[in-house]
Image (cartoon, rainbow, N blue to C red):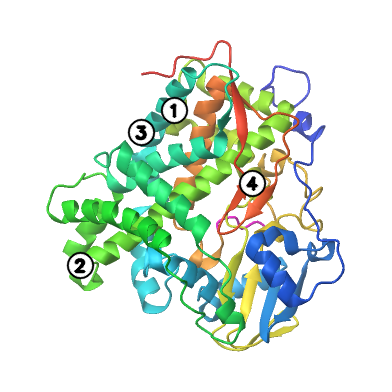
Amino acid sequence: MLQWLNRPIGFTEELSGKSFSPSRANYYTGPPGKPIQLLVQARKDFLSIWRASDYKEKVSEIRVLGRQIVIVNSPEPIRHVVVKRHENFQRKTPQMRRALEFLLGDGLFISDGDTWKQRRPLVTDIVHAKRVPSFGPIMERTSVELVERWKRIPEGTPINALHEMAGLTAEIIARSVFGNDLGDDSAAAVTEGFTSYQALVDSINIGYFLGFDEGLPIFRTPTLRRSVKRIHRIIDKVVEDHLSGRGDHNSMVELLVRRQMKSPELKLDVVALRNEAATIFMAGHETTASTLTWAWYLLSRAQWVEEALHAEIGRVCGSRIPTIDDVPQLELCKAVIEETLRLYPPVPILARQTRDAEMIGDVAAERGSLVLIVPWLLHRTGSLFERPHHFRPERFMGGRRPKPYSYIPFASGPRVCPGLHFGLTEAVLCLAIIAQQFRVVVASTHKVEPVCRLTLRPKGGLPITLEKRNGAPRADR
């Protein structure tokens, strides 16, 4: 029996004895809508269009203005799409490509074909699990800086957790990707530019449903252009500095530059380097910030888990600040993050476009159809997860793992997120360092509403207050 809580009951049983449903899926319960109405609604919030019957293992299809949409919500058909026949489904949809191409160009996230095959191994190696420990000191130092700033905030002062976590993860990824010379002002400018871009861009490309297989270019308004120019100007300057030999030798951009110098056939010019740097920054910043924000919400509503989390940090770290070397022993911290990713996947829709007609399950997918794998649905399917809407971190403890292809917060197959080890380690470590010092409190009267455009965020952010934990060690080093 595990005595982590110094109680006669085992740790896992203690957690299993309680649970709560943080946010049951807001099923659409109105009259059957016409597909075009669902499309309009999806432009506002992708999560609001699903019925209770959609949270079942199945492959289904609908048509919108003649365009076929295939929804794949069953592990074996998902494996068929993302692994067995991935070359037929590797192409990102016009919705995603058109929404992000102005900002990311041909970056790895939206590229396919030869460009993807050439750059995928390069970027994967840059953020590979074996390199993550070298970025640990950046994660630790940046988290401690946030803790020290929080200590100066008068207790009871409301702050926005989403904004705070975005600032934290932006600084971590900025220091990791660009090196320490970026500076607070430039890091903030890139972060604000991404936030503005996401608010302005339309993630539903109407042209695609009107018959244009490549969709239609987005309208580049003056405001949108300013957001992109702001980001590109900063990243271009960093890349040019590296090419001139003035770069930080520990940064990801410097590693990309060295690869280009060693292998000119990669053709990573300034624009291509900027596109990959911007892609890594966007993916690494936004997804981890969202995950940490949702984790604070869940812990605030499940205080028995929060207490056990504090006990684990005390047992593993004692009176010192958690480090990256502690992450393998922080089993509950990791389980909390993984259960958060199950309930609130940062990218709750994985969309592909078929190259050729093919059967998916018992549905005949046409050439050029839209194939949707929706982690929001999949992770809350009752046949795959017991009490699927409940926060139960013990699902991921004691060697337990979900059924293959039922849990895919980082996608899966050849297009699995190359930075998943970086992001997961970062989230666990940040959670441990902050939780060691503070209780993050969400008012019981505050209604939290998840909303999805490009990523999944709490509507209006997450207002919190902070409670300093008695006996927490000093965070300054």
Do the CB atoms of the residues marked 2 and 4 lie less than 8 Å apart? no
Amino acid of disc 1: Leu
At label 3, the amino acid type is Pro
Quadrant, the N terminus: top right
Helix, strand or loop for the magenta stretch, by majority? loop
SS class, disc 3: helix
Q: Which mark is residue 146?
A: 1
Find the magenta span and give its range: 406-410
Residue at image point 31% right, 39% down:
185
Answer yes or no: is residue 419 visible.
no
Residue 263: give its label: 2
Question: Which quarter of the picture shows residue 338?
Answer: top right
Between the C-alphas of marks 1 and 3, the distance is: 14 Å
Q: Does the magenta stretch include residue 407?
A: yes
At mark 2, the secondary structure is loop
Q: Give me the residue at 73% from left, 26% from top.
A: 304
Place of residue 18 in the rendered image (x, y in percent of width and height, measured from the top left) = 81, 32
Q: Which of marks 4 and 1 is in front?
A: 4
Q: Nearer the viewer, residue 201 or 110?
A: 201
Which disc number belongs to residue 459? 4
Say the numbered circle drawn on residue 100: none
**Local SS, label 4:** loop
Q: Which of marks 1 and 3 is nearer the N terminus?
A: 3
Q: Residues within 10 Å of mark 1 (few under 14, many from 20)?
A: some
Label 2, label 4: how far apart the Cα atoms are? 45 Å
Q: Is residue 440 above or below residue 419?
A: above
Circle 3 sits on which residue?
137
Mark positioned earlier in the residue sequence (4 or 3): 3
